[in-house]
Image: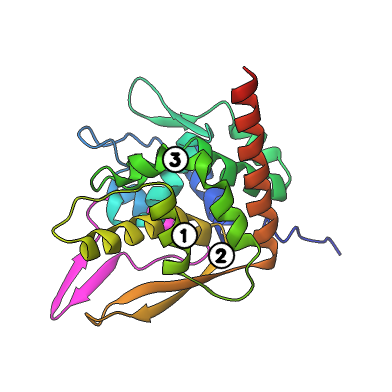
Amino acid sequence: MEMRDPFEEEEFIYDFKVFLSYITSHKVRLTPKMQWIPVKHIYAINSLFKHPASLQEKIGEKVYKLREEIGYSRFYFIDLLSLASECLVVNDKQILTKGPQYDNFMQADAFFKKLGLVISWWFDLYWDSWMPEGDFGQMLDSRKLYMIPYLEKVLHKQGMISVKEFSRPLIEGLSLKWSASSPDIARDLMEWGIERCILLPLSYFDIVRLEYRENKYGLQEIGGFYIKPDGRIFLRSLVREMRRRIYRDFSN
């Protein structure tokens, strides 16, 4: 009986390969204004995912269907990551096609597929594209290499880590800012930005498990997260790569 690689069966790796396979076997031309994948292709690809998402929302008696790519966060992240990792490129006709790393990725062992995508997310995906609201994504992106001590701190934690426990040292230590009408609102927005830029991708990679709670407005929000046992391997590898790049930059 053939043994399956557990990482190959992980949902994100499975869906990422589905995404690449579809794009490279269909002519997918980006929308002219926003350079997004047309909705018809999003529906088609989503139907092939391991656990297809519902692409419509009912509010009262009205049903609202997905109308643009950015409204489907996980799909949008996969799209951005496929370009950041150079598995795909956009040609001069605005058509997505195989990139220089496509074959290397598809042929790699699943562990290295996942590790390579985590590294590409951290170093090659421009977080301002992932979080276009304001300039907070750009601010975090410029401080990535300074996050080593904050990642190492949570690596030593057991049990649930609250969003505040993770985000507040980052906000203070990295001098993060968000212009708002009050310091409390600014802090809430920065915590949301950290959730969006760091915690949500980590959950996509199955490195952390998010815990949700109901906020004062009756809406679901992330209250904290657990680092999964295998997730620690990838976080430690990310920290080592950060250190390697810092050493390289100082040596040049």
Tell me, yes or no, if residue 35 can be seen here.
Answer: yes
Sequence-first tag of 1 and 2: 1
- Image coordinates for residue 145, horizontal then vertical, percent: 52, 39
Give the CA distance from mark 1 to mark 2.
8 Å
Residue 143's disc is 3
Q: Residue at x 66, y 64 (%)?
A: 156
Q: Quadrant of residue 106?
A: top right
Q: Is residue 48 magenta?
A: yes
- Image coloring type: rainbow
Front residue of this view, candidates 233 and 58: 233
**197 w.r.t. 157: above or below:** above
**126 w.r.t. 6: above or below:** above
Residue type indicated by callout 2: Val
**Secondary structure under badge 3?**
loop
Q: Quadrant of residue 183?
A: bottom left
Q: Quadrant of residue 7?
A: bottom right
**Secondary structure under badge 2?**
strand
Residue at the extreme top? 252
Residue type indicated by callout 1: Leu
**Secondary structure under badge 1?**
helix
Residue 199's disc is 1
Q: Which residues are magenta?
A: 44-69
Residue count near mark 2 (Cα–Cα under 10 Å), binned few <14, some 14–19, many ≥20? many
Sequence-first tag of 1 and 3: 3
Q: Residue at x 46, y 54 (%)?
A: 198
- Image coordinates for residue 186, horizontal then vertical, percent: 24, 58
- Is the C terminus in the top left, top right, bottom left or bottom right quadrant? top right
The answer to whether the residue labelled 1 contacts the one labelled 2, judged by CB atoms less than 8 Å apart, is yes
User: Which residue is identified by label 2?
Assistant: 208
Q: Which of labels 1 and 3 is toward the front?
A: 3
The answer to whether the residue labelled 1 contacts the one labelled 3, judged by CB atoms less than 8 Å apart, is no
